[in-house]
Image: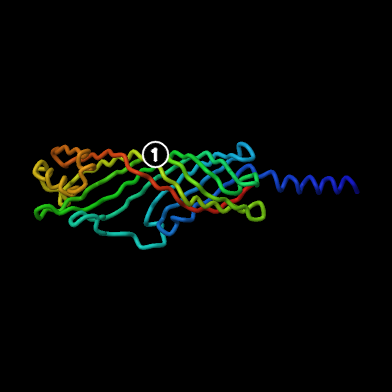
Amino acid sequence: MKKIFFVIAFLLTVSVFAQENNIKLGIGGIAMGDYSLSYERLITPKSTINANFGYLNLEWGALPVVSLSDISSDVKLNQIKSGLHSSIDYRFYAGKKDNLRGIYFAPYVRYWDYKFVMDDEIDGTIFDINTKVWSIGLGFQMGYQWLVSDKISIDWYFLGFGAEWLNTSAAYVTQNGSAFNYSTIEDDVRGVFDGFTFVEKRLTTEPVDDRLKINLPVWLPGVKTGISIGYAF
């Protein structure tokens, strides 16, 4: 009988304290077609490493795909093709409880890469703007994680700020594919950023035979928030 009680006590102890891994699905962006999966691993009773990987495709979302929404008076968003994002953070849990629960503080590094198409009309000619934006950044976030029945995790990172190096590369191409002297629209392209001197100074343009290439590297503040649900084991 004593052996039975010992085995039961041992199993209960394992069920309470053995949570060293946590697999989570991000739910904050699913309606827009942003799917992410993260894995958290316990390093010490009060610290973990959390890695996140995600993919964005608006056509997979429940909400209607944004089309031709205004960005400026002339430039309009036509289509967001796809995007990848990832991040890794080192979490310090500050609450009284151990094992993947409570309030935490976490420095993080993240990367994202999105591709989309915009439209711009200049002097009666309509251009497609094939655009790629990527960014890498560092920051610090706060969050809280619950463990329901010691298994179901709810992770809410509600406050995250950082600095990000963002680079935008794009190409103006006529929609009908006709020959065009792209050097004649360089000033018009720069005019999109009128009033944003900090950004405009960093914009470079390069006309070639079949397109106008533009490049815009810049430091910007970053924000990081989200919520996920998972299973701890």
- Front-lying residue, 224 or 195: 195
Residue located at (64% from left, 46% from top): 96
Q: Quadrant of residue 222?
A: top left
Q: Which residue is mark 1?
A: 137
Local crowd size for mark 1, using a 10 Å CA cut-off: few (<14), some (14–19), many (≥20): many
Between 53 and 98, which is closer to the camera in this rendering?
98
Q: Nearer the viewer, residue 74 or 34?
A: 74
What is the x, y in percent for residue 35? 45, 52
Q: Is residue 132 left or right of residue 49?
A: left
Give the amino acid type for the residue marked by disc 1 in the picture.
Gly
Is residue 51 toward the left or the right of residue 11 in the image? left
Percent x, y for residue 155? 54, 51
Residue 161 x/y as whole percent: 42, 45
Q: Is residue 54 left or right of residue 14?
A: left
User: What's the colour scheme?
Assistant: rainbow
Count of numbered circles in the view:
1
Which one is nearer the viewer's eye here, 55 or 74? 74
Which residue shows up at 18% across the image and 55% down it?
Answer: 74
Residue 68 horizontal/vertical position (percent): 25, 59
Furthest residue in direction right, as rendered: 1
Report helix, strand or loop for mark 1. Answer: strand
